[in-house]
Image (cartoon, helix red, strand yellow):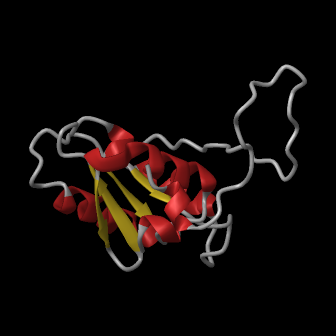
Amino acid sequence: MTPDDVTNLGFRTDLMVLGEQTVFASLGDGLLVRSPTNPSFFWGNFLLLRRPPPPTQVAATIARFQSAMAEFADVRHVAIGWDHVHGDGGWSDDDTIAAFEALGFNAERGMVLTSTAQRIHSRAATGFEIRPPIGADEWEL
């Protein structure tokens, strides 16, 4: 998995904004995101999985994150997200979240607003083009 493979527009935007301070490592089934200059930044140092782990694999997933972050002594958090359509892993997100919560974690669900139509306000600034990004290169900074 690479940043270009991420389908969730919230995570995709977050990865774009992180920019050059961040190192990405493909893990096949996920993406390791590290910000060496800012190790305490939760969503600059996290594991993004294609799908939620099965509830029986939550402890192993946490260990995987901790192992991947071991070189950064200042990373004292665990941040794991998944890039998927709800319920496509064969088990419920709720089951996975319950397994994390049973280990003392707090779950956060994010909502990302998108639009299929463009509406330009009558007082909008001029000289700008408003359109969807075209191609992976337009996500580059």
Whether 37 is drawn above or below 117: the answer is above
Q: Quadrant of residue 42?
A: top left
In terms of depth relative to the viewer, which is nearer, 65 or 39?
39
Image point (75%, 47%), residue name: 114
- Asked whether the viewer can see residue 104, the reply is no
Horizontal side of residue 25 vs 113, given as left or right? left
Q: Quadrant of residue 87?
A: bottom right
Residue 74: horizontal and vertical position, in percent? 13, 38
Residue 73: horizontal and vertical position, in percent? 9, 44
Horizontal side of residue 44 vs 112, given as left or right? left
Whether 77 is drawn above or below 22: the answer is above
Q: Quadrant of residue 61?
A: bottom left
Residue 59: horizontal and vertical position, in percent? 33, 62
Q: How many marks?
A: 0
In terms of depth relative to the viewer, which is nearer, 40 or 128?
128
Whether 18 is drawn above or below 51: the answer is above
**Residue at far front of view:** 127
- Asked whether the viewer can see residue 85, the reply is yes
Image point (84%, 53%), residue name: 116
Instruction: Tell me the quadrant of the picture where the N terminus can be found.
Output: bottom left
Horizontal side of residue 18 vs 88, given as left or right? left
Image point (88%, 38%), residue name: 119
Residue 84: horizontal and vertical position, in percent? 60, 67
Horizontal side of residue 90 vs 106, given as left or right? right
In terms of depth relative to the viewer, which is nearer, 140 or 27?
140
